[in-house]
Amino acid sequence: MEFLLDTANLEWIRRCCDAFPITGVTSNPSILKAEGKLNLFAHFRKIRALIGLERTLHIQVLAEDCEGILADAATILQQVDERVYIKVPTTEEGLKAMKALKEKGVGVTATAIYSKIQGFLAIAAGADFIAPYFNRMENLDVDAREVIAAFAEMIGRTGANTKILAASFKNMAQVNDALMAGAQTVTVQPALLCDALKSAAVEKAVRDFAADWKAVYGEDTLQNMA
């Protein structure tokens, strides 16, 4: 089970990597838009410096045709580093590019997945990650849980090395459902992840623990009792 951050914001990345068991960072043009016009590759190099080489970094191409996708991928790998996973939309041209990238040993994340057949084809093309869009599928009246479960079954049946990287969530219930359906990995917006731990019940429990300690030990702490 892995948790990735769906953001390009350096402060969020720093905060969440300090607090949570984060295993990587994903981005796309919509995520980048939220940060304004950046010195793009310098910014991604800063992200890599923050997360280190042990975490995965996923960067999306812009081109839509195979030749352009391969050119975009080469630029990303040259300007950031060779460990980046190239995010490729799961279209006919995208699948063609995925096969070519895998022949070169490049990490591939198949994205913009809304259907079973897209995922199956991306698995067969050798994608390292497939990214089904959970909430967007639900908006289209597609059962996202069933789709993810089908991917998990196919990966198990074929012995593929592909991981399901579920994306596009509006709440933590969807994140939980994706993981329970068989996703090995999820990418979540930092605010959604942090807000999930904000609960009146949890906060009350913490306050009650502190009050009960104080009732017995006053201002003593564990450190000064050693």
Image (spheres, grey):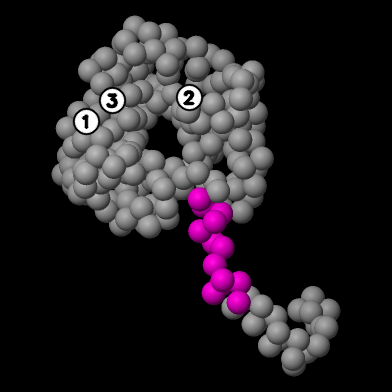
Does residue 23 belong to the magenta stretch? no
| Label drawn at residue 29 | 2
From this view, report whether residue 38 is shown above or below residue 188.
above
What residue is at 53 percent from the left and 36 percent from the top?
7
| Label drawn at residue 90 | 3
Does residue 194 belong to the magenta stretch? yes
208 to the left or right of 70: right
Measured in 3D between alpha carbons, the distance from the residue under mark 1 to the one under mark 3, in whole angstroms, is 6 Å
| Label drawn at residue 118 | 1
Mark nearer the viewer, 2 or 3: 2
Q: Earlier in the sequence, mark 1 or mark 3?
A: 3
**In which quadrant of the rendered image does the C terminus lie?**
bottom right
The magenta stretch is: 192-204
Task: Describe the element under mark 1 as helix, strand or loop.
Answer: helix
The amino acid marked with disc number 3 is Thr
Q: Residue 141: image x %, image y %?
A: 22, 44
